[in-house]
Amino acid sequence: MARKARAHPAPGGKRSSRYAAADFKARCLELMDRVRETGVEYVVTKHGKPVAKLVPFTEDARPSFFGSLKGSVLKYERPFDPIDGAYDINE
């Protein structure tokens, strides 16, 4: 006989329900759909102790690192010509 999930308050005012691992395994796809649709969170337990948490996925708000410096380098017409000026290495 499957046990019912118990609701518990989660950080941020959301409610989370606890499921024993065996019950979670039997209802996993259904619970994932519910998380996507409603944003509810589920805690998976083994022997009454929390072991995993199913939460809604959110994209990172920060932009990608690749391409982030595009346009920030000044154009240098002769990259292989020596740079004018005195340097310690020449002394």
Image (spheres, rainbow, N blue to C red):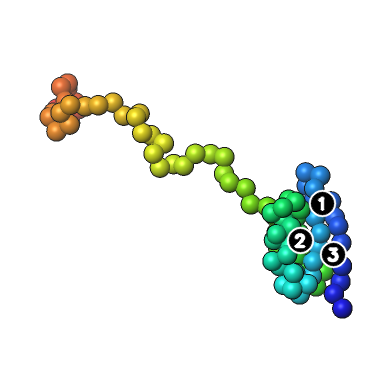
Pointer 3 local density, CA inside 10 Å: few below 14, some 14–19, many at least 20: some
Give the mark count: 3
Q: Is the N terminus in the top left, top right, bottom left or bottom right quadrant?
A: bottom right
Image x and y of residue 76, in percent: 21, 27
Pointer 2 local density, CA inside 10 Å: few below 14, some 14–19, many at least 20: many
Q: CA distance from mark 1 to mark 2?
A: 10 Å
Image x and y of residue 72, in percent: 35, 29
Query: Amino acid type of disc 3?
Result: Ala
Residue beneath disc 1: 15
Residue beneath disc 3: 5
Q: Which of the marked residues, 2 or 3, is nearer the chain's N terminus?
A: 3
SS category of the residue bearing label 3 = loop
Q: Is residue 34 visible?
A: yes
Pointer 1 local density, CA inside 10 Å: few below 14, some 14–19, many at least 20: some
Image x and y of residue 23, in percent: 78, 72
SS category of the residue bearing label 1 = strand
Q: CA distance from mark 1 to mark 3?
A: 12 Å
Q: Which mark is residue 84?
A: none
Residue beneath disc 2: 43
Which residue is depicted at the point 81% across and 62% down?
18
Residue 75 vertical position relative to residue 14 in the rendered view, above or below: above
Which residue is depicted at the point 25% across and 26% down?
75
Which residue is depicted at the point 72% across and 56% down?
35
Are circles 1 and 2 on residues that touch, CB within 8 Å?
no
